[in-house]
Image (cartoon, rainbow, N blue to C red):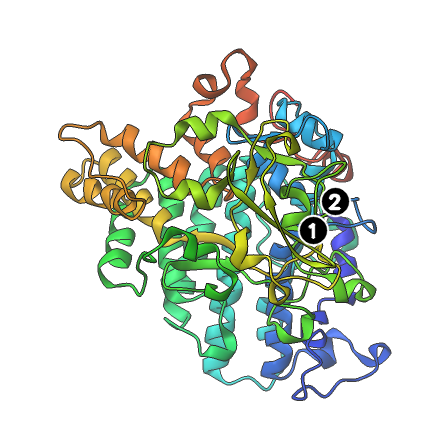
C-alpha cells in the first residue's frame, strides 16, 4: 500500500458528500472525522461508493495527479493486436505501449496501480469502520461487508492480472512508516480473492432496487468466482460456478449485440458488472464521478471515450483526438456475414457519427481520418451521439463501460468445459449462442472448440478490457506478436515509484 494513501483518510467520506442528498446531515468539512462520519447507513453507502469511484478513475483524464490520459485503454486495448496507436494523432505513451515498450517509470502502470490500491483502501476502511460504534442494523452490516469484500476482491483480481504477484492489502495499516507491503504469492492472492468473493456471494442481495442499480449482486460475485477460477485453472470450480449462473442466474443475451452499448440500455439483462457513468452532473448517480478531478470539473465529467476513440486530427469533424485506431488484423478476423462488424468499426462507405458542442455530426466516413483507415464505432453510432449522452462541450459521454457481460461468461464456461474435460456439447452450445446472435451459423461438425472459443472471444469482446489478459493467460504472445514478443510482458512492471517507496520490500517483476 502506498504511503500517500494516508491522505485518503481526509477524503474517504467524499462518497457521501458527492450526491448532496437531502438525507444527509452535512457538516462543515473541518468537523468531519472518521469517528463522527461513519455512523448512518447513508454514511456507509457514501463510503462504499467512493470505492466504486476508483474504478471510474482507471479511464480518467487528469492534469492534477499523474497526468493520466485514458491510460487503462492503452494498457488493455492499444497494447493488443486489435488496436493501434494512430501514427499521426496519438501521444507518445500510446505509441510506446503499441510497440511493446514497457517501462517501470512510465505513467500508465503508476496510474493503474494507484487507482487499484486506492479502491482497496476505501473498501478496507468500510470493513474497518463496520466494527466501530455506528447506527447500522445487523442486516446493514452483512450487506455492506459483503459489498466491500466484493470490491476488495475485484481490485485485487485486476492487480493479479496486471502485475502477477502484487501485495495483498487486507486491512488498514495505521502507521505511516508501515505502509509498504511485500509481494504476495499467486496462491495467497487466489485464496484471498476467492474467500472475499465467497463472502460476497453469501451476503449480497441477488438484485438491488432501482435506486441502487449498478451495485454488485450475489450473482455478480458467483460469476467472478467462476472467472477467477479460470485464471487459477481450477476448472471444476469454474464449471460449478458458471453452471449455476447459466442455469439459475438472472442473465441472458440481449437479442441484438449493439444493444449492449446503447446508453438507453445500460444495466440490461446481459450485464453482470458495468462501470456506472451517469450525467450530466454527478448528483444524479450513485458513484462518485471521476474523482481524479476536483469539483470544478464536475460539469464536463463522465468518460472521455469518444475524445480518444473518435476520428481525430486536422479537418476531422468533432474535434476529437483519434488516438486509438482499430487494426486491419482485427477487421480481417471477422467472418463474412458477422453482424457485429457494423457495431464495431467505421470503414469506407459507412456513415460516421460524432458529436461536439454544436450537436450530432453526420458525414460519410473518410478512411484518411485514421492511419489504419478504420475508427471504432462501439459505444458510438447514431443512437449514442445525442445530447442525453454527452456533456455540453461534447467531449465527455455518460454511457457506462461494460466490464463483465453474460456473453463473456458463456465463453469462459465453454473454456472451462473444454480445458477441464467437461461436457463438450454444452461448451459448443455456449459458443454457438454467441455466433448465432451475430448472424453466424453453428460451428461445423468436428470443429476445434478451443480455437473457436478463442476466435469468438476476440471478436465479441473487442475494445473491452480483456484481450491482453487472454493473450498472456493463453501463452499466445509469440503467435500474436512474433519476434516482438518478450516473455517478461506476461506481467506489467510494478511502478518504479512504488519500488522506491517500499525501500526494496516490493520486488520488481523479472526483466524490468
Residue position marked by numbered label 2 in the rendering: 68
Q: Residues within 10 Å of mark 1 (few under 14, many from 20)?
A: many
Image quadrant where residue 182 sits: top right
Mark before the other along the chain sequence, 2 or 1:
1
Residue topped by disc 1: 60
Above or below residue 154? Residue 70 is above
Measured as percent of width and height from the top left, residue 7 is found at 79, 59
User: 454 or 477, which lies in front?
Assistant: 454
> In the picture, which quadrant includes the C terminus?
top right
- Which structural element holds mark 2? loop
Q: Name above or below for residue 376 compared with residue 13.
A: above
Q: Quadrant of residue 342?
A: top left
Place of residue 318 in the rendered image (x, y in percent of width and height, measured from the top left): 70, 48
Q: Is residue 113 left or right of residue 482?
A: right
**Nearer to me, 239 or 232:** 239
Residue 281 or 1: which is nearer the viewer? Answer: 281
Q: Position of residue 21 (x, y in %)?
A: 67, 83
Q: Quick one: label 2, few (<14), some, or many (20+) residues within 10 Å?
A: many
Q: Residue furthest right?
A: 30
Task: Kindly check if marks 2 and 1 are in contact, taking CB atoms under 8 A apart as contact.
Answer: yes
Q: Please say whether residue 105 is visible from this viewpoint.
A: no
Real-space Cα separation, disc 2 to disc 1, in angstroms: 6 Å
Q: Residue at x 59, y 87 (%)?
A: 135
Amino acid at each position: 500500500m502506498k504511503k500517500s494513501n494516508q491522505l485518503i483518510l481526509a477524503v474517504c467520506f467524499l462518497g457521501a458528500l458527492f450526491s448532496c442528498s437531502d438525507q444527509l446531515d452535512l457538516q462543515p468539512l473541518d468537523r468531519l472525522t472518521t469517528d463522527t462520519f461513519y455512523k448512518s447507513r447513508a454514511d456507509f453507502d457514501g463510503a462504499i461508493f467512493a470505492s466504486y469511484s476508483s474504478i471510474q478513475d482507471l479511464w480518467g483524464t487528469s492534469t492534477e495527479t499523474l497526468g493520466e490520459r485514458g491510460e487503462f485503454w492503452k494498457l488493455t486495448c492499444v497494447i493488443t493486436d486489435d488496436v493501434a496507436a494512430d501514427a499521426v494523432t496519438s501521444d507518445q505513451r500510446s505509441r510506446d505501449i503499441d510497440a511493446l515498450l514497457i517501462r517501470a517509470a512510465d505513467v500508465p502502470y503508476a496510474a493503474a496501480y494507484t487507482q487499484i490500491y486506492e479502491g482497496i483502501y476505501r473498501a478496507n476502511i468500510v470493513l474497518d469502520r463496520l466494527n466501530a460504534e455506528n447506527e447500522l442494523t445487523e442486516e446493514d452490516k452483512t450487506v455492506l461487508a459483503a459489498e466491500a469484500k466484493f470490491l476488495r476482491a475485484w481490485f485485487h483480481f485486476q492487480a493479479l492480472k496486471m502485475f502477477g504477484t502484487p501485495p495483498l492489502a487486507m486491512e488498514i495499516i495505521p502507521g505511516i512508516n508501515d505502509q509498504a507491503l511485500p509481494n504476495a504469492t499467486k496462491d495467497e492472492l487466489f485464496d484471498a480473492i476467492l474467500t472475499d468473493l465467497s463472502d460476497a456471494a453469501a451476503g449480497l442481495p441477488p438484485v438491488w432496487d432501482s435506486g441502487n442499480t449498478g451495485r454488485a449482486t450475489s450473482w455478480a460475485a458467483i460469476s467472478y468466482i467462476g472467472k477467477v477460477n479460470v485464471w487459477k485453472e481450477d476448472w471444476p470450480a469454474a464449471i460449478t460456478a458458471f453452471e449455476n449462473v447459466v442455469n439459475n442466474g438472472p442473465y441472458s443475451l440481449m437479442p441484438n449485440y449493439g444493444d449492449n452499448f446503447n446508453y438507453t440500455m445500460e444495466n440490461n439483462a446481459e450485464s453482470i458488472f458495468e462501470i456506472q457513468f451517469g450525467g450530466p452532473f454527478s448528483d444524479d448517480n450513485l458513484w462518485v464521478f471521476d474523482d481524479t478531478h476536483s469539483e470544478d470539473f464536475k460539469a464536463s465529467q463522465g468518460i472521455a471515450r469518444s475524445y480518444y476513440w473518435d476520428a481525430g486530427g486536422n479537418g476531422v469533424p468533432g474535434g476529437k483526438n483519434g488516438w486509438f485506431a482499430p487494426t486491419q488484423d482485427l477487421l480481417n478476423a471477422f467472418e463474412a456475414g458477422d453482424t457485429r462488424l457494423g457495431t464495431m468499426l467505421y470503414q469506407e462507405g459507412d456513415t460516421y457519427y460524432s458529436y461536439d458542442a454544436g450537436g450530432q455530426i453526420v458525414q460519410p466516413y473518410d478512411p484518411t481520418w485514421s492511419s489504419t483507415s478504420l475508427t471504432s464505432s462501439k459505444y458510438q453510432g447514431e443512437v449514442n451521439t445525442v445530447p442525453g449522452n454527452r456533456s455540453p462541450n461534447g467531449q465527455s459521454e455518460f454511457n457506462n463501460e461494460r466490464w463483465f457481460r453474460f456473453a463473456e461468461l458463456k465463453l469462459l464456461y465453454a473454456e472451462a468445459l473444454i480445458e477441464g474435460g467437461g461436457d463438450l456439447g454444452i461448451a459448443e452450445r455456449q459458443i454457438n449462442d454467441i455466433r448465432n446472435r451475430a448472424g453466424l451459423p453453428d460451428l461445423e461438425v468436428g470443429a476445434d472448440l478451443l480455437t473457436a472459443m478463442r476466435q469468438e472471444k476476440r471478436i465479441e469482446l473487442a475494445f473491452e478490457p480483456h484481450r491482453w489478459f487472454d493473450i498472456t493467460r493463453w501463452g499466445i504472445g509469440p503467435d500474436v506478436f512474433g519476434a516482438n514478443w518478450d516473455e517478461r510482458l506476461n506481467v506489467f512492471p510494478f511502478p518504479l515509484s512504488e519500488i522506491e517507496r517500499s525501500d526494496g520490500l516490493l520486488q520488481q517483476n523479472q526483466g524490468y
